[in-house]
Amino acid sequence: MTHEEIGLSGTPKKSVTIVIDGRKCRADEGEIVLSAALREGAAIPHLCYEASLDPYGACRLCMVEVCHNGKTSMVTACTLHATEGLEIRTDTPEIVKYRNVLFELYLAEAPKSDVIKEMAARYGVTRTRFLKKIDTDDPLGGSCVLCGLCVRVCNEIMGAGAIGFVNRGPYTVVGTPFFEANTDCIGCGACANVCPTHAIRIEDRDGERVMHSWGGGRVRLAQCGVCGKYYAPGALTAATLARLLPPLRDDLAGLCPACRAKRIADEEIRVNMRGGADHHVRPRRS
Amino acid sequence: MDEKTLDDVISRYDSPSGRLLGILGEIQNREGYVPRDALEMLSAKLDVRLSQLYGLVTFYSFFSLKPVGDHVITVCMGTACHVRGAVEVLAALEQLLGIEDEATQDGKFSVTTEDNRFTLEIARCFGACSMAPVVEIDGNLYGYVTPETLPGILGNYGWRES
């Protein structure tokens, strides 16, 4: 779907009324129903929803019942778009039954994940009838639900493509090629950030970011030229700076976010004290 | 696999989408497996992430990342062959070749003898169910196989009882 459709173009979106569990709520037309429902405080469990990526519907946990012309059907709320008069229910006996089986499946898929255990327990599921997956080759040690968010964010947003799905069927895991450190990894940590079960282990130490889950790959962190703090992976800062225009880029290179803000503020004050200037971010230094 | 051969293979596939499997398939057929250096070279040449190639190679049971022996024996474990005794045939082959039953880490069954002469694999169906149970060796199909007829068949490939 395009930016216009989801309302990123700046023009105000048409507002529609949707009904969640009998309660009328406002939503933007075309808005993801899960996002609207969460804003309205409806308790819909979900694992694979990430606003910055396209709707995917992998985890199936956000399944809701949609009433349309008197007929009901089950749809994932994260792939459903708001339309005028849309009516959904989040807690019908059918949904509850469906969801409980899913929780059992997730307890078997990721038996080591505390996030899954807690989430399932909140819905009254504490045990699973399915065989627990124990895979000694899994870099994520039995905490991964294979939602694919890390793989997608690495590919689609960061453009690094350092990790991917490996093997097939019950042997599927997420990992780097040959389960070794991958030079494609820029150490941005987006994978760990989006992981719904916090399965990905990354650690910053001694000026390096160590990707424990991805074959122990190491990425050098950039050091702030002013305060000396290590603040972000070198490759990531280089890629970000490359997108800026030269004067600003040169001014900001080698600075941590805190020192960057300080420098811009200092310049701003200096320029204003001198009686103002026609530019306000780009500081001129001789 | 050297660079020239790889360039040669790539040059035969010009469609930018959907050529990966064709190229990988040809590497597999030429070498009997997909060597790591060929994967890395291919990744650099086609500007495709290594993680994507690795995902493809580990997904399809057609590909192997480990070198195979001189002769590849594939036992059909499809439904018809299973019913007609494929399990016994597989067990007999393992015993004759002196290899232990083990699934590899990626869930594919592929075991090579220590002297690198035979590789034992399984397949799901050859489409030759009328001759079940079926065993394929280096592309030659053998039907109505029993543990008793196996030594004779293996004899055609240089196997001798030790």
Image: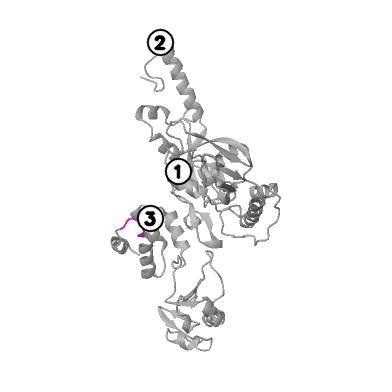
Query: In this orientation, which residue lies closer to the viewer: A204 or A195?
Result: A195
Q: What residue did someone put label 2 on? A: A275
Q: Is residue B14 above or below residue B122?
A: above
Residue B17 is one of the magenta-drawn residues: yes
Left or right: residue A128 compared with residue B134: right
Q: Position of residue B53 (x, y in %)?
A: 42, 57
Res A22 quadrant in image: top right
Q: Looking at the image, is mark 1 or mark 2 nearer the viewer? A: 1
Q: Are marks 1 and 2 in contact (CB under 8 Å)?
A: no
Q: What residue did someone put label 1 on? A: A157
Q: What type of secondary structure mainly makes up the magenta span?
A: loop
Q: Secondary structure at mark 2?
A: loop
Res A78 quadrant in image: top right
Q: Position of residue B146 (x, y in %)?
A: 52, 86
Q: Residue at x 42, y 68 (%)?
A: B33
Check disc 2: other Cα within 10 Å, few if <14, some if 14-19, many if 20+: few
Do the residues marked 1 and 3 share a common chain? no
Q: Is residue A47 visible?
A: no
Residue B3 is one of the magenta-drawn residues: no
Which amino acid type corresponds to the residue marked 3 in the rendered image? Answer: Ser
Q: Looking at the image, is mark 1 or mark 3 nearer the viewer? A: 1
Q: What residue did someone put label 3 on? A: B43
